[in-house]
Image (spheres, grey):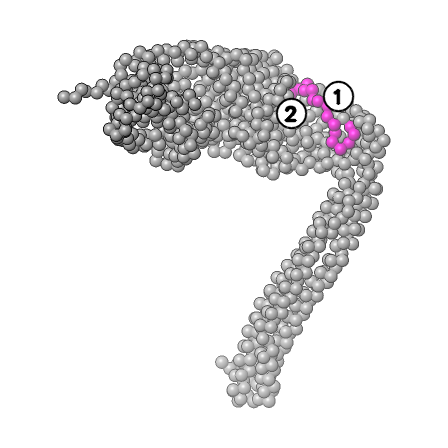
Amino acid sequence: MSERIKIFRWRAVGPLLVLFVIGCVLWWLFADTIARHESQKVGTSLLGAKVEIQYLHLDLAHGDVTIKGLTIASPHEAFKNLLQADELVADLDMLPLTEKKLVIDRIVANGLRFGTPRETDGRVPAESGQGIAGTVLAETREWASRFQVPVLQLATGKISVDSLDPRRLSTIPAADALSARADSSRRAWQTGFDTLRLGPTLDSAGATLEQLRNARATDLATINTARQAIDRLKRARDRVTTLERNVKTGVAQLQAGLAGLDSARQRDYAFARGLLKLPSLDAPDIGAAVFGPGAIKPFEQALYYAQLARRYMPPGLLPRATTGPSRVRRAGETVRFPKERALPAFLLRSAELSFLGYAGRLTGLTSDPALYGRPTVFAASGPQLAAGAMLNHTRGVPLDTAGATVGGVQFPAFDVPGVPLRLDPGAATTQLGFSLNGDTIHARFAIRSSNVRWTRDSGFANSAIGNLVWRAVSGISNLDVETRLSGALEHPALAVRSNLDQAIASRLRAELGTQVDAAEKQMRARVDALVNAKVGPVRARVTEVQTQAQTQVAQQRARIDELQKNLEQRLRQLMGGVRLP
Amino acid sequence: MFTLIKLIQSLFGALHSEGTPGQLAAGIVLGSFLGLTPLMNLHNAGIFAALVLLNVSFAGGMLGWALFVPIGFMLDPLFDWIGHTLLLDVSFLRPLWTSLYNMPVVPLTNFNNTVVLGSLVFALVFALPLFFVTRWGVARYRVTIGERVRQSKWYRTLMASKAYNVYKLFKP
């Protein structure tokens, strides 16, 4: 009888237990370090900017995590931090950890500081497009770049006239197209007219009329032939009516084409004006040119965080796939399966923030808003600060709103684009209002300062326009800028208004208005010279074609009507007023 | 080079061990799980414990692991596709994944990662054919050229190295 093979290798239990104990000891020794590294890695990946932690301690027995020296770099500015915190103490709910869910009952954060400088570039996805944060960053950058901010080109004060290339004018190809359409219409109408075959009908009706004139009332065959001729004339008139309708439609289209030529000419005027590099004299354009580039940035940043929140906190309960953990093997995708009445994968019930005498509170930050059932709410207040935000992703259409008023913000001085001036807004009060409802955005950013300082760029001391603008603004010590954004997220309308617009615009108009008008007149004349040579003959051709077609139709209709009238009149004479069946 | 020598030592050590072909094949199958699936996952702790505790060839396990690591890397795109299909495209499995995802401990296995699930499913499906083919192959080897290899000079040289002594600690 063969010896029974043992299934278990009991002597291996000892080494396995030793291995387990070694594992526990290693965990005890390195858990904090591992958790710190992992937190940094995950945080960096989530935010798209470096997250650094100086010290992290896990106290799993009490469910506490203590973080000291937290630094989160700004994803938008190279040498700036988004925030720094001296200490964060988190109170974890331990049971959900067994489901790989992180539920934090409460976080207390002390010593928060915002916008502090840093020595190294903290932006991670510099090349953009990597991971969710990188993708969102690239998307919002692309979104911000779509705004066409007008440029003030006043630095030299000269009006430069670039050569006007006729090939770039839209009126000329439009005129060619209209000419071809007129010829095509003429041919179509002629074909239509030929297919009417009115000649035999009219000749036959004419001959019948002659016979009828010599006929008597008893000549029933002739009378019958006359009646048939009248029927043929009626049918011919119907065909002419149909053709006439076609001609009318075609003529209307040609007329629209002529109107289109006028619109194209207006576009060519605008294009030529652009070539002239004329300074804009409209106040809104000046406001957009001076403050537009800087004013889009706050919207871009607010949109970045809103879109990031939408990616990490999507509405609904459908499975969500995200890139898996980075490892030597392929990362794959990690899919979450939220379930009703279950805990979210991440939930921060409440966070209390304190910084420099300010206090803030954040509640309901979660990866699965539909499970938590309440929006994420943030509020902060303090001297010269009032801020609030709400991320409501509990329904199908997410709604993200934020508002903040901050006083005493020291903005850096900046060069005013296009003019040799530097503006130092000083300590200003800023307001930001942001609402992203589904794909509709409404946002407002305002800066108010009563202590602005202007400096001139000495390199442009002799610039006439520079002097002009300097005289217009140097006496202004108040700054009031408001930027508004509204409409569909893909193509929102940007409006910039400031108290400087009108001052600069009126001064420029007074000084440059005559020059600008003369230059515009000159450029219009050049456009007209190029366009009229082409448009004139086309206009005449269109008129000729439509007149010819209308005349032809009218003549034939008149002939048909006359013959029918004569035939009917003669028939009535023969019948002596008696109507035959 | 040292790794290669160790691998060859493991291979011949396992083939000429006192374990049955079935024990060796079972070890290789368990090792293939370690090699095919991403290593740092909870299920692999269970596989390793099974390899140690069950009376299977530990050397075979190490051999299977070593052999299947490169195959795992190569087949990662396939695993990703299998996992993606099972997790997201097969609708009738969704309630199962949802239940598992919201259960204690199970999510710690990372079953909801496409590569982990795909490779695990592949390894499970591949396990039985691998077991039978390996068992047959080892048996054939032992009755045909096994004894001649054991008597050869190069085999004795190979097995005399220190690494073999380490292996002997865990021989079945």
| Name of the residue lying farthest toward the left | A1
Would residue A364 be counted in the magenta stretch?
no
Residue topped by disc 1: A451
Q: CA distance from mark 1 to mark 2?
A: 17 Å
Chain part drawn in magenta: A405-421
Residue A440 quadrant: top right
* Residue shown at the point (35%, 15%) measured from the top left: B166
Residue topped by disc 2: A431
| Name of the residue lying farthest toward the front | B153
Would residue A406 be counted in the magenta stretch?
yes
Report the front residue among A382 and B81: B81
Report the front residue among A373 and A331: A331
> Which of the numbered marks, if any, corresponds to residue A391?
none
Q: Residues within 10 Å of mark 2 (few under 14, many from 20)?
A: some
Q: What residue type is disc 2 on?
A: Gln
Residue A34 visible, this orientation = yes
Residue A435 visible, this orientation = no
Q: Residues within 10 Å of mark 1 (few under 14, many from 20)?
A: some
* Residue shown at the point (44%, 10%) measured from the top left: A29
Q: What residue type is disc 1 on?
A: Asn
| Name of the residue lying farthest toward the right | A462
Chain label for disc 1? A
**Residue B36: % across, % down:** 38, 28
* Residue shown at the point (69%, 22%) measured from the top left: A411
**Residue A332: % across, % down:** 44, 30
**Residue B124: % across, % down:** 32, 30
Quadrant occupied by the N terminus of chain A: top left
SS at circle 2: strand
Given contact means CB atoms under 8 Å apart, are the residues at marks 1 and 2 in contact?
no
Chain label for disc 2? A
SS at circle 1: loop
User: Height in image: A541 above or below A462?
Assistant: below
